[in-house]
Amino acid sequence: MKTTTEYVRRLIITTDDDGTRTTTTAATVRTVTEYLFSELSPEAQARAVSDAIEEETSADNWYTSQSYFAEEEIWDAAQELEKHQPVHIGTDAGGSPYGTARRYAWSVADWESVTEEQDTGICWSMDICDKWNEYAARIIALQEAHEDATDRAYIHDENADNAAENGNVKISEAERRRAAFYEDMAERIEAAAEELTEEAARAVGNVVDSLIESERDYYSSPEFWREWLEDGEARFTRDGERI
């Protein structure tokens, strides 16, 4: 508890119409007592916590709130992923994050450019990258399977051409059937890889959404503010109003 007393002495000089001057003095004393959070009554503490939550969640204070700075870090982690992977994290009309796979303007499809992602060591980045990598490992396996099926289709096409040149129609037809089989396999793998990449993007968007929601809940909770105010140096009136 800290008590401050302010003493103000005033000299008042009055001059009447006849020129008579009268001098008087007056003094005011104001005493203010400031309390740390731990020094407040339970009722005053409850008010201090309630006021802090109201200030944190007010739209007018958004850019100075705890939630704002936490969300900025989460978005930074999402944008770091976007630099290396074919994914875009945006927000819908209601402000809720979502994820979509991003297609490139050049020839490589989105799923073909997927790799495993290395996090930055920040907790948000670890959560986001862990979710992405759950899908990335499977997509990479599909990349390899697609390449293998494409190679096999090409080989059987070559064999069919060679057999046809040698007049072996039976072998040529068999090889073309094999080539068609692997071409179909490659198309089905590509479709699966595209769908899985979209699913990975949505999953990352859901992680970002969940992280933001979790941080908002945390910074608007009485538990957080009670601990924050107990550890801080903020001062309050006896009733719990912040000074």
Image (spheres, helix red, strand yellow):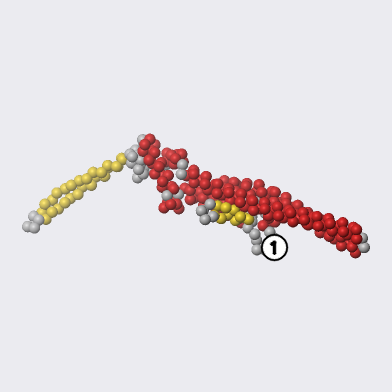
Residue occupying image coordinates x 69% and y 62%: 107
Query: On the picture, is 40 further left or further right than 132?
Result: left
Q: Residues within 10 Å of mark 1 (few under 14, many from 20)?
A: few
Q: Which residue is situated farthest in the top direction here?
A: 42
Q: Residue at x 58, y 49 (%)?
A: 206
Q: Nearer the viewer, residue 184 or 38?
A: 184
Q: How many marks?
A: 1
Q: Is residue 40 left or right of residue 120?
A: left
Q: Indicate the position of residue 129 as horizontal and vertical percent values.
A: 62, 48
- Judge whether residue 39 can be spotted in this image: no
Identity of the residue furthest to the left in this view:
18
At x 29% / y 42%, what residue is drawn?
32
Q: Quadrant of the N terminus?
A: top left
Q: In the rendered image, which residue does mark 1 sit on?
A: 107
Q: Quadrant of the C terminus?
A: top left
The answer to whether residue 1 is left or right of residue 79 is left
Q: Residue furthest right?
A: 167
Q: Is residue 163 above or below residue 30?
A: below
Disc 1 secondary structure class: loop
Q: Residue at x 42, y 49 (%)?
A: 58
In the rendering, at what x and y percent does residue 56 appear? Answer: 43, 47
Q: Amino acid at mark 1?
A: Ser
Q: Is residue 23 visible?
A: yes
Question: Relative to the observer, which residue lies in front, 231 or 9?
Answer: 231
Question: Where is residue 178 drawn, in percent x and y?
Answer: 83, 55
Instruction: Return the x and y of residue 23 as percentages of the image width and height.
Output: 13, 51
